[in-house]
Amino acid sequence: MTASAKQILNIGMKGLLSAISGFFLKPGFDAARKAAEQGNPLSQFNLGLMYYKGRAVRQNYTEAVKWWRLSAEKGFAEALNNLGMMYGNGDGVAQDHVEAHKWFDLAAAHHPRGRKRRKSVRDRDFLVKRMTSAQVAEAERLAREWTAAFEKRQMT
């Protein structure tokens, strides 16, 4: 077999494997979407991840943000952190370091002690170096307001 024939075969196999994996991911996507629409925060997070990575669906950062925001509203720490990332990078939303700081701060507060909490703190502190003191104060105020609203929702 010539080099070009091997390349064509490899490309064909990759395409076939991609199509097969996409076929098997579709039921997972459908199940995640149904559970997410019913308000399950883990499913909302996972659906956002599927949109973010383009798994079983066309990559769409705006949809990822939408589903992560719904999950975050229920206090899901991974979603809080990912919203910080999206605002920090301007993926699916306008880049906004104040919002990114807020979400990283909230993620750090919701993660249990450990690696993920340290990462949220590190990402937040990275932003602080690029923000004015007024911006940091605004981000902290927004985080306090979000926390108060979250705690109120938990009581009802």
Image: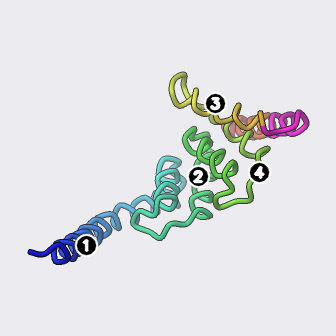
Q: Are marks 4 and 2 in contact (CB under 8 Å)?
A: no
Gap between marks 4 and 2, in whole Å?
A: 17 Å
To which residue does mark 1 refer? 11
Q: Main secondary structure of the magenta part?
A: helix
Q: Which mark is residue 68?
A: 2
Gap between marks 1 and 3, in whole Å?
A: 41 Å
Residue 107 falls in image quadrant = top right
Tell me the magenta residue range.
130-142
**Count of marks overlaid on the render:** 4
Q: Nearer the viewer, residue 29 or 92?
A: 92
Q: Nearer the viewer, mark 4 or mark 2?
A: 4
Disc 2 residue crowd, few under 14, some 14–19, many 20+, Cα 10 Å = many
Mark 2 secondary-structure assignment: helix
Q: Nearer the viewer, residue 111 or 123?
A: 123
Q: Earlier in the sequence, mark 1 or mark 2?
A: 1
Quadrant occupied by the N terminus = bottom left
Residue type, mark 1 in image? Ile
To which residue does mark 4 refer? 96
Q: Earlier in the sequence, mark 4 or mark 2?
A: 2
Q: Nearer the viewer, mark 1 or mark 3?
A: 1
Whether 37 is drawn above or below 124: the answer is below
Extreme-left residue of the structure = 1
Q: Where is residue 147 drawn, in percent x and y?
A: 74, 35
Residue type, mark 2 in image? Trp
Mark 1 secondary-structure assignment: helix
To which residue does mark 3 refer? 122
Q: Where is residue 55 drawn, in percent x and y?
A: 41, 62
